[in-house]
Amino acid sequence: MQTSSEACIEADGLEKVFQVRRRTGVLRRERREVRAVDGISFTVPRGEMVGFIGPNGAGKSTTIKMLTGILTPSGGRLRVAGIDPPRERTRLARRIGVVFGQRTTLWWDLPLRDSYALVRRIYRIPGERYRANLDRCIELLDLGALLDVPVRQLSLGQRMRADIAAALLHDPEVLYLDEPTIGLDVISKAQVRSFLQDLNAEQGTTVLLTTHDLTDIEQLCKRVIVIDHGHLMYDGALAGLHEVGESERTLVVDLERELPPIEGVPGARTVRTEGPRQWLAFAAAASAAPIVSRIAADYPLVDLSLREPDIEDVIARMYAQQRPDAEAAAGTGAEAGTGTGTGAGTGSGAGTAG
Ligand SMILES: Nc1ncnc2c1ncn2[C@@H]1O[C@H](COP(=O)(O)OP(=O)(O)OP(=O)(O)O)[C@@H](O)[C@H]1O
């Protein structure tokens, strides 16, 4: 395992096996092993913001629970901020922050202000530091008007910003974010992303970000780690992931009026039309700019938006590259055996972008 004084998270052959008992008859039960995490190795240097993605059931939450010390690994070696998580869970808790998009860590019936005061007591945050961190979060996350509102009355976007602040009051070196933009509107997503960008740049906080929204990754992370069925599938730049899977982005174009399908735009093809709206697919690793300029020059353009591919789709296409029989799952005509070498075979190690 590569050890570096700068490494903040180090996982080497990390495993988690659950024993599940299943009723198979009136008096019969079967024991079954679920290998939720099956030999994952990766290193995250201090101050890096890394996307940690994979389809449902891939093993992301199980990995994060091991990184926080909530779950004890069945095998392998793990260090977070130099600490063995399950052995020194309490010491680790002072060094990490965790935000789950789907549930709050705040007190439902308490005004936000009181929730923060409780967080301060739990972590024994010195007064001056607490006030400075709270003031900073209030300003940057726009929480001023919400401090006296009970958490249950906050909108999803407000609650998410409030939760992020709660996770940062004790100055954690590492922040785990599990779907921090799920269900948020465009403005709230932008607010959360911009805050995380500043946090990472100014405080040097190491961030592991789990998300199904590739735009989060695109805007925040230079590096992405993909897992599936407990295995590391890919570790490198997002652009490289698109190249491996030959995934596509979609340009949604609104024209002044209904017209025949747009033609003659190099690198793009019209995949759907509906009245004045048309959908054009193009390689996700390519730039949208020349395609947009060409359409704007040749067609009466009113509006357009860009859609990132689904993470599930990108991963299915990665499989299709490696196994021709998986093409159907990807729903594409992608050809097998043309991987760029940046990806990894199923269940094997992966190239690291560091
Ligand atoms: N406590 C548990 N007991 C038994 N099996 C479990 C347990 N927790 C998770 N699993 C199984 O481990 C596998 C990985 O689950 P995990 O929740 O880590 O995936 P995930 O990538 O976080 O998925 P999602 O995106 O749906 O949250 C799944 O097959 C899941 O059913």
Image (cartoon, rainbow, N blue to C red):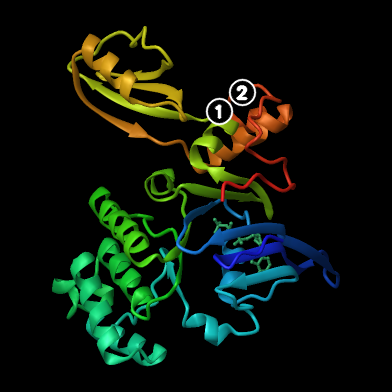
Task: Give how far across and how far down residue 86 sits, in percent.
Answer: 64, 80
Measured in 3D between alpha carbons, the distance from the residue under mark 1 to the one under mark 2, in whole angstroms, is 7 Å
Task: Give how far across and how far down residue 346 sits, in percent.
Answer: 72, 43
Is 87 situated left or right of 250 in this image? right
Closest to the observer: 7 or 300?
A: 7
**In this view, 218 is above or below 290:** below
- Residue position for label 1: 246
The kind of residue tagged 2 is Ala
Ligand 1: quadrant of the figure:
bottom right
Could you tell me if the residues under marks 1 and 2 are in contact, i.e. CB atoms within 8 Å? yes
Q: Secondary structure at mark 1?
A: loop
- Report the residue that reaches farthest toward the right: 28
Question: For the point 25% across and 56% down, which residue is it?
Answer: 191
Closest to the observer: 17 or 208?
A: 208
Task: Give how far across and how far down residue 283 sits, in percent.
Answer: 47, 25
Q: Dot 1: within a 10 Å radius of its alpha carbon, few (fewer than 14), some, or many (20 or more) residues?
A: many
**In this view, 340 is above or below 19:** above
Question: For the point 46% across and 30% down, which residue is it?
Answer: 284
Q: Secondary structure at mark 2?
A: loop
Is 76 situated left or right of 155 in this image? right
Q: Dot 2: within a 10 Å radius of its alpha carbon, few (fewer than 14), some, or many (20 or more) residues?
A: some
Count of residue discs: 2
Question: For the point 44% across and 44% down, which residue is it?
Answer: 214
The kind of residue tagged 1 is Glu
Q: Which mark is residue 334?
A: 2
